[in-house]
Each structure stands twice: as structure tokens, then as C-alpha cells.
Image (tube, grey):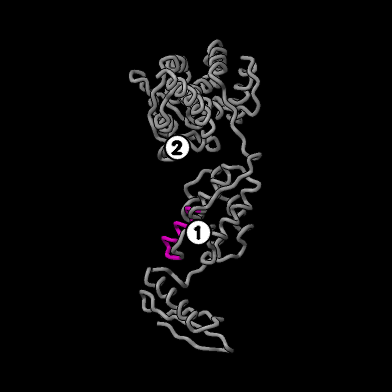
Amino acid sequence: MANFMKRNGKWQARVSWRDADGKLHQKSKAGFATKAQAKLYAVELESELGKGVDVAADPVFADYFERWYETYREPHLRPGSKSQYTAVILSIKKYFKKTKLKSINRSMYQQAINTYGANHSKGTVQRFDMFVKSCVRSAIADGIITRDFTYGAKLPFDESKSRHVEYLSVAELKQLVKTLENDLPCENIAVYVILTAIYTGARFGEILALQWDDIDFERKTISITKTWDQRRHIAGPPKTPHSIRTIRVNIKLLKWLKQLYGNSQTMIFVCSKFDGDINYKVNSTLSKYLQKAGLKKQDFHLHSLRHTHVAYLLSQGVDLYAISKRLGHANMGITSNIYAYFIDEYKRKSDDQIESKLDEI
């Protein structure tokens, strides 16, 4: 129910209601020039109440985002992902300060994302927008707001901050494999890890966690069901549920891996043999063999081989859907976003081929 009164020449609207427990609540707003404006405010407020909106709740956006993160995200994240959310929380506090959640509209959000994107890379801006979108959906589900202020936002970014990952061409990849396979002592496990990365496109932690039971030598498949936790030296759940997958591999890789049978009856790569920083040892080994193969690459590391795997499969005409499933992505959209510049490159080649074929008609 709404009441209206005039004070000092201005109109005030007060709306009263009872919650599910019968508790009385009131919300008022003053300063309207006319009674009609006050009535319009009351009608809108009562409409929100009718939709189940918690009109009494109006938290500061930064506070709500932080609580949402601590409740729904933090318990399920790895340290690297937590640091990404922490950075976004700091940015939200910087750009929105004490702004209330209900006060934010699309224009305000677009202005914030414009400022943020002016000195951040495309991937960082997309991640910021994705996190905020998820939080906003939660606020709508909580009945605090009714509209998604992130809807239709354009995402500007600083191109100079965007770095394309280094990857090997087909010729370079073949040269590296040739150099590696000429030096395969069983005790040099890092070389086998590198070859597995080349032929599977799996993540570093997924490779280290592989056990002999994960390989089906008859069907020529490897099942990826876990990842290696370097801090605790145990195998844990994979990055996401979609990371659990079974992929086909070539017989050559399987023959190489069989050479490690004598090292352990359980773990393929026997992680205990890597003393200290596992990541450093594998990356330094990769750097050594790149130089040995005559390949000069800057900022090239083991994860670059995952990108190389994708580039190679695309160059051979493998369908993007199949590549996405092989990588353990939730959908093709993720794959196409990450590897957009690969896809654009091979699209240009395909367009040239199409043009050539059309000329033959």
C-alpha cells in the first residue's frame, strides 16, 4: 500500500508491505516535484514487489560481488583462478566504488568497461565481463534486481596488450619431433612429457597425472580424468568437468611411452623423479631441444605445444568441433575465442582454395 504526503513543497511516497513471515516493511522516497511523479515511483516499486524483487535489499555492488565470489566461486577454484577473481574485485571497487547494485544501469556499466578496456587486453576484458555477468545473473536470481545491466555491452580493449601465443609451423614441429625422438633415454622423462604434449594437446597437469590404467593400447586411446597438483604432489580433479575425456592417439606415441614401463607400475611419468619446480625442468628441457633443432622461439613453453597441437590439426583440415572435444573445452565457442587468430589464418587459406576451385567451373 502507498501513502503520499507533501513537505516543504515536495512530494514523498511511502510504500508498505509485509514479507512471508508477516513482518512489516516500509520504503520511502522524497523530493518529487509533483504527486504524479511520486505515484509513478510507488507503482514501479509495487510492481517490483509483485515480481518477487527484494526491494529492501540494495547492497553496494562491490560488496555483493565479493560475497557472491566467496560463496559460489572461491570454494571450487584453483589458486590461479582465484587470483583472476581477486583482480576483478579490485577493479570493481576502483570503478564502481560505493555504488549500489540497483543504481547501476547499462550506460554506467558500458562507461566502466570502456575505461577498463583502454589499458587491458582482449582476453582480460572478456574475463572481467564474464565474471560480472555471472554475478548479475545471481543478483537477478536473488530478487535484488530485475534487469541485466551487462546486456549488449561492447568490449573495447588495448590491442597492444594482447599477445598472440607462439606456436610452431608444421615444418618446425616436425623438426622438433625428429630432434626429440633421436634422444629418448628412459630417465629423461621431460622429453616424454614434451612428446605427449605435442601429440595429445593435453594440459601440463593432465599429462603428469596420467597412469598406465589411463591408456588403452588396443584402442589407441588415453583417458584424461585428473590433473597433477604440484603443491601437494597428488592427482586431483581436472580443471572442469568437461576436461574429463578420452582421446585417440597415434601408435608412435604409445610405443615411446611403453619405454617408461620400468619406471613405475602406476604413474607413467613418475612425478617424484622431478625434484623442485617440475614446470621449470620441463620448460628448460623444451628450450634446450628447440635450440638443438635450430628453432629460435621467444616466450615458448610447454603450454605453447597445446596451441601448436591446435594449429597443426587446423592446418590438416580437422573439424573445430572435434578439436574442441579433444582439448576438453565446454563448447566450441571457447575454442574459437582462444584460437580466433588461428582460425582466421586458415579461413583465409580456405577462401583462396574456394576461389581457385570456383575458377575451375
Q: Residue furthest left?
A: 218
Separation (CA) of disc 1 from disc 2: 33 Å
Please say whether residue 142 is one of the residues in the magenta stretch: yes
- Quarter of the image with the N terminus in it: bottom left
Which amino acid lies under the numbered mark 2 shown in the image of this protein? Pro
Query: Sequence-wise, which precedes: disc 1 or disc 2?
Result: 1
The percent position of residue 84, horizontal first and vertical second, equals 57, 46
| Residue drawn at (56%, 89%) of the image | 7
Q: Nearer the viewer, residue 217 or 172?
A: 172
State the SS at label 1. Answer: loop
Residue marked by disc 1: 149
- Quarter of the image with the C terminus in it: top left
The percent position of residue 281, horizontal first and vertical second, equals 61, 26
| Residue drawn at (49%, 35%) of the image | 234
| Magenta stretch bounds | 133-144
- Say above or below: 207 vs 122: above
Q: Is residue 171 left or right of residue 331?
A: right
Observer able to see residue 248: yes
Observer able to see residue 197: no
Which amino acid lies under the numbered mark 1 shown in the image of this protein? Phe
State the SS at label 2. Answer: loop
Q: Tag on residue 72?
A: none
Which image quarter: residue 161? Answer: top right
- Say above or below: 212 vs 47: above
The percent position of residue 35, horizontal first and vertical second, equals 49, 84
In this view, the mark in front (1 or 2): 1
The percent position of residue 323, horizontal first and vertical second, equals 43, 29
Residue marked by disc 2: 238
| Residue drawn at (54%, 35%) of the image | 230
